[in-house]
Amino acid sequence: MANKKISDFQIYQKYMDLIFYSNDLVRKYPKSENFALVQEIKNVLYSGLRNVIYGLKTYDTKEKLKYLNELDINLNLLKIHIRISHKYKYITTKNYTTWSEKLTNITNMLGGWINACLKK
C-alpha cells in the first residue's frame, strides 16, 4: 500500500465520480437554494472526501475507524439531502435513482472496508 497513490483506490475513484455527478446536479437547483441545500450538499461531499483521504492515509486502525465512521455519517446525511432534493422536485426520479445507486455503491465498499479493519 505504501507505493500506491490515493487515486489508485477504487473507493476514492467512486467518491470523485460522486462529487462530479453531484456538482453537475446542484448547478441546476434554484438560486434560492444556493446558500442552503446546495451549500450543505457540497459541505457534506467535501467533508466525506477528506474522510476518505484520512482513511487511506492513516495506519492506526482505531484512528482509521474513526474516519470511516465519520464518512458513513456523511453518506447518510447525503442520502437525506438527496431525498429532500427529490421531494422538492429539484432533481428527476432518474437523477434520484442514479445518485442513490452511486451512494449505495460507496456505502457497500465502505462497509467492507470497516469490516476488514475490525478483523485486524
Image (cartoon, helix red, strand yellow):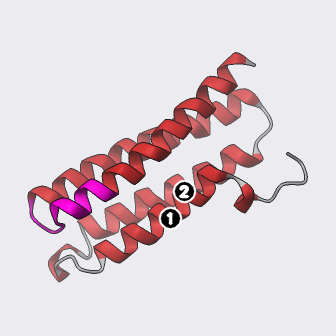
43 left or right of 66 in image: left
Amino acid type for the residue under numbered disc 1: Asp
- Residue at (71%, 47%) from the top-left corner? 56
37 left or right of 89 in image: right
61 left or right of 42 in image: right
- Residue at (37%, 67%) from the top-left corner? 22
The residue to which callout 1 is attached is 17
Q: Could you say whether the residue bearing mark 2 is in a helix, strand or loop?
A: helix
The magenta stretch is 88-98
Is the residue under label 1 in contact with that under label 2 (CB below 8 Å)? Answer: yes
Q: Which mark is residue 14?
A: 2
Amino acid type for the residue under numbered disc 2: Lys
On whether residue 7 falls in the magenta region, the answer is no
On whether residue 90 falls in the magenta region, the answer is yes
Where residue 104 appears, as percent x and y from the top left, is 40, 43
The quarter of the image holding the C terminus is top right
Where residue 94 appears, as percent x and y from the top left, is 21, 62
Rendering quarter of residue 7: bottom right
Rendering quarter of residue 87: bottom left
Q: Which mark is residue 88?
A: none
